[in-house]
Amino acid sequence: MKRVAVLISGRGSNLGALIAAQDASYRVILVISNVEGAAGLDKAQTAGIATLVIPHTGKTREAFDAEVDGALRAAGAELVVLAGFMRILSDGFVRGWEGKLINIHPSLLPAYRGTRVHERVIEAGDVLSGASVHFVVPELDAGPVIARATVPVHPDDTPQALAERVLVVELKLYPEALKLLATDKVALKNGLAVFTA
Ligand code: GAR
């Protein structure tokens, strides 16, 4: 059973899904938020999971990341899962958790890295969008993809409506992808997501 820490900044829908889907393969042992009062913290506390608020304000990126890293190591985390964590992590942090650090992004990566994803998908006239779970590498949203799920884009979509449709598939996709990693069915090797049966 892998000890998983989840990093959040906000409402924590994905965190809730990861907690609900826990099985013999992983346990969420710590939730860290960089934002005080993030709604996801309540979800963790209700589930009896330890929480920590580490504000990023007034710190260098490296100092903040070192604090998060220290908390993760002290808790004995084996895997680190970013779930709506809206901070860019330093290269040093990412390298220290290489192959153990994953993120979910609300687009069909490698398309639409970064922010304003749903606005850009609608502006481009795409008919398909979705979500991707990927290994985190130093370059933003550029790591090898573990799993994707698609949703249709409707002609009259607003960014909000599309975000909600994508979120529905995220909540199923993220636990599935985490279980692949927790059971060693996927690993990061030579910059690729390598799958075994
Ligand atoms: C999710 O849609 C996630 O894909 C997105 O933030 C939302 C968090 O919602 N993440 C990113 O955009 C990362 N670049 P949640 O806090 O309710 O899980």
Image (cartoon, rainbow, N blue to C red):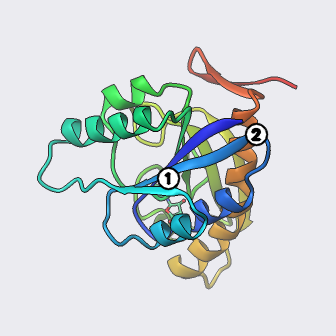
The residue nearer to you, when weighing 122 against 15, is 15
Q: Could you tell whether 88 is left or right of 40 in the image? A: left
Q: Quadrant of the N terminus?
A: top right
Q: Which residue is mark 1?
A: 112
Q: Which residue is mark 2?
A: 25
Q: How many marks?
A: 2
Amino acid, disc 1: Tyr
- Rendered image quadrant of residue 125: bottom right
SS category of the residue bearing label 2: loop
Q: Position of residue 18 (x, y in %)?
A: 66, 56
Residue extending furthest top?
190
The residue nearer to you, when weighing 11 against 120, is 11
Q: Quadrant of the C terminus?
A: top right
SS category of the residue bearing label 1: loop
Amino acid, disc 2: Ser
- Rendered image quadrant of residue 190: top right
Residue at (58% x, 56% y) in the render: 107
Residue at (67% x, 52% y) in the render: 174
